[in-house]
Image (cartoon, rainbow, N blue to C red):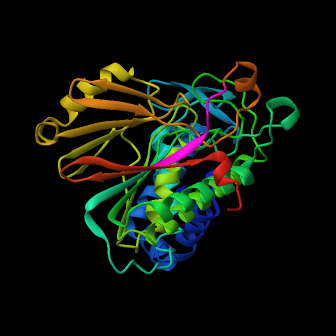
Amino acid sequence: MTDVEGLLPFCESDAQRRLIQAIVREGSIAKGGAALGINRRNVQRMLVLIRTNAARRGYAPESQMTRPVSPAHVAETSTMYDADGNVKLQWVKAKLSTSDAFQALQEAIQQAADEYRGVAKPVKAPARSDAELLTVYPMGDPHVGMYAWKDEAGEDFDCDIARQDLLSATSRLVQVAPGSERALIVNLGDFFHSDNNQNRTSRSGHALDVDTRWPRVLKVGCQIMIDLVGLALRKHQRVEVINAIGNHDDHSSVMLSAFMEAFFHKEPRVLIHPAGPKFHYVTHGRVLIGVTHGDTVKPAQLGGVMAADQGEAWGFAEHRHWLTGHIHHSSKLELPGCTVESFRTLASRDAWATAAGYRAGRDMVAIAYHREFGEVERYRCDIRMARSDG
């Protein structure tokens, strides 16, 4: 147990620390996991995360690495062995950690979400619904966590305002939308304004104006999505959610889907689509819908992407549509075989967008698709309507 006990300083969460302590106390990995009610797969997953973090920081006794660096650094270790294989000299360099370690992050997010598994309380289903229709609620770039100051950007904007706008607009749209059996909430990407606590985009390092602390932004965002699903469940028998990966939230969008999957784990009327793919597809009769943020592929290429990815569904469908975000304004391109539409955001402009001259309108829509006839209804909620009392 000495090896496992030595991992305690490298635990990154209370759950990890409790696991190591239980293993030491119970005398074995299996008994330690059982004492905490954690299944074998999750125990092994947590141990891999802990060992990986320990190795990054220079602690891996099985590889003769025993000189760890601080939590803010990663270790670069060089070891010289003598003719008998014994360690003769060892150099340890500490450098600031810059690796995204995306797979490890996904595992850590899933572990954290497990604590919320099955928390959602049942919502009474509507008495009647139309199986012929699918209602889609696309959300263009919500940018939860963005901060704007009225004197600089024309109006104030923060987490609380973003929450109120999204809930109000969605509530209005749910009220007027048809009572379809199936609903699809589409987060078109950039749901979160920032992807880390450095308040910079993870790809380009662009500085961001962020409201309060990043953990609070994540908490508010998760609560918003829970409430949006709750609104839809009151109108529709089944609710599906797609969280597209944006250029502002490569990692936190994955966290959001993992959290929602865990939260609604025991709610059979909710389906959370996997977060990993850059391109998502949904079929409804002869309707084929593609979802992507729009930051990696030009709109004119999306028809070919859909045909290549969904050959069989493309051949069967008569109505093919791409739903995208990213550009914050409405546009619609008709390609051979499909349309590509971008949607506006409800979010305010930040200081950078204001100075750059962006002035697009702000709204949210709901679209009803018939399984044979394609789009049959569309409803719109302007930002002013979302904020009105009427």
Relative to 339, does residue 288 appear above or below in the rendering?
below
Nearer to the camera, 382 or 275: 382
Q: Quadrant of residue 143?
A: top right
Query: Horizontal and vertical percent for residue 9?
Result: 66, 53
- Asked whether residue 362 is in view, the answer is yes
The residue drawn where x is 32% and y is 77% is 128
Relative to 170, does residue 202 appear above or below in the rendering?
above
The residue drawn where x is 55% and y is 34% is 100
Q: Is residue 361 magenta?
A: yes
Q: Quadrant of residue 78?
A: top right
Query: Horizontal and vertical percent for residue 72?
Result: 71, 38
Q: Name the image quarter holding the C terminus.
A: bottom right
Query: Horizontal and vertical percent for residue 26?
Result: 52, 76
Query: Horizontal and vertical percent for residue 223?
Result: 61, 61
Query: For the magenta stretch, what is the residue range?
Result: 359-366
Considering every residue shown, the one lying at the far front of the view is: 390
The residue drawn where x is 53% and y is 68% is 115
